[in-house]
Image: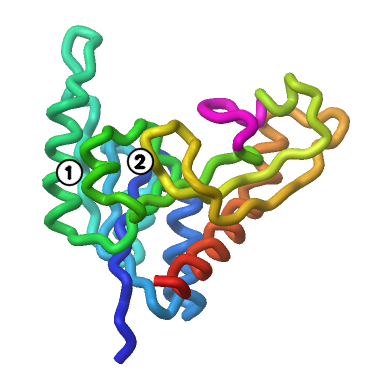
């Protein structure tokens, strides 16, 4: 029997990239992968319900419970998250709309095992609101980048990119909407590349 690579997904929101990857695995497009858990930092994240509907174990490490008087205790939050990740023994950690920056201890503990997708053609437009950044800069095209995660925000080595044109009249919302299915395909294709070489 083929060895399955254990995948853990981190998501904060709707989990559309998670759903695309989980469905690709279920449909036999990523034969050497299995998702052993979805972790969210938000109790109301739709990704949790999506994972449960697919009978994938879910875990909540709620970042809001580490906020007091407007301050976020990142150290304690990361400590709990790291403990859970170690317990789940992932071969790969996939960030799928995870809206917190991972701390150095987690990145160090899972070096070359963490993958993210970012909605721009990196190294352009790192950080939040990448589509708005592209529009404000007058770009003719944008896209998405699947990359390894390191200490440099959105600065890890690129695995795969895909492009889409920017049309006159595009807004941040229309561009994000058009880019989403491209993100799904690109993340899955990047995973195929990674799993083939592991």
Q: Which mark is residue 82?
A: 1
Label 2 and label 1: CA atoms lie apart by 20 Å
Give the residue displayed 53% in from the left and 63% down from the top: 188
Give the residue displayed 16% in from the left and 26% down from the top: 75
Give the residue displayed 76% in from the left and 46% down from the top: 164
Local secondary structure at mark 1? helix
Give the residue displayed 79% in from the left and 30% down from the top: 139
Which residue occupies the foreground of this view, 195 or 185? 195
x, y (%) of residue 166? 80, 37
> Is the residue marked by circle 2 packed among few (<14), some (14-19), or many (20+) residues within 10 Å?
some
Q: Which residue is mark 2?
A: 45
| Quadrant that contains the C terminus | bottom left
Q: Which mark is residue 21?
A: none
Residue range corresponding to the magenta coloring: 123-132
x, y (%) of residue 92? 33, 59
Q: Magenta includes 127?
A: yes
Which residue occupies the foreground of this view, 166 or 145? 145
Which residue occupies the foreground of this view, 64 or 117? 117
Res. 169 in view: yes
Residue 94, above or below 172: below
Q: Magenta includes 77?
A: no
Residue 196, above or below 18: below
| Marks 2, 1: nearer the viewer | 1
Lower position in the chain sequence, tag 2 or tag 1: 2
x, y (%) of residue 117? 51, 46
x, y (%) of residue 51? 34, 58
- Count how many numbered circles sit on residues in the image: 2
Helix, strand or loop: magenta stretch:
loop
Local secondary structure at mark 2? loop
């Amino acid at each position: 029997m083929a060895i399955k690579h254990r995948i853990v997904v981190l998501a904060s929101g709707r989990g559309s990239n998670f759903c695309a990857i989980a469905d690709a695995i279920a449909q036999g497009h990523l034969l050497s992968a299995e998702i052993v858990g979805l972790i969210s930092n938000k109790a109301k994240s739709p990704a949790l319900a999506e994972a449960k509907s697919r009978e994938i174990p879910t875990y909540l490490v709620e970042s809001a419970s580490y906020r007091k008087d407007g301050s976020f205790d990142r150290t304690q939050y990361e400590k709990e998250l790291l403990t859970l990740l170690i317990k789940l023994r992932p071969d790969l950690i996939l960030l799928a709309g995870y809206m917190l920056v991972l701390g150095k201890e987690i990145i160090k503990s899972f070096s070359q095992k963490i993958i993210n997708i970012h909605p721009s053609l990196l190294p352009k437009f790192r950080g939040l609101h990448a589509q708005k950044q592209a529009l404000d800069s007058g770009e003719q095209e944008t896209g998405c980048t699947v990359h390894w995660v390191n200490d440099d925000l959105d600065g890890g080595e690129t695995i795969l990119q895909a492009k889409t044109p920017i049309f006159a009249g595009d807004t941040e919302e229309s561009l994000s909407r058009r880019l989403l299915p491209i993100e799904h395909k690109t993340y899955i294709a990047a995973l195929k590349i990674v799993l083939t070489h592991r």
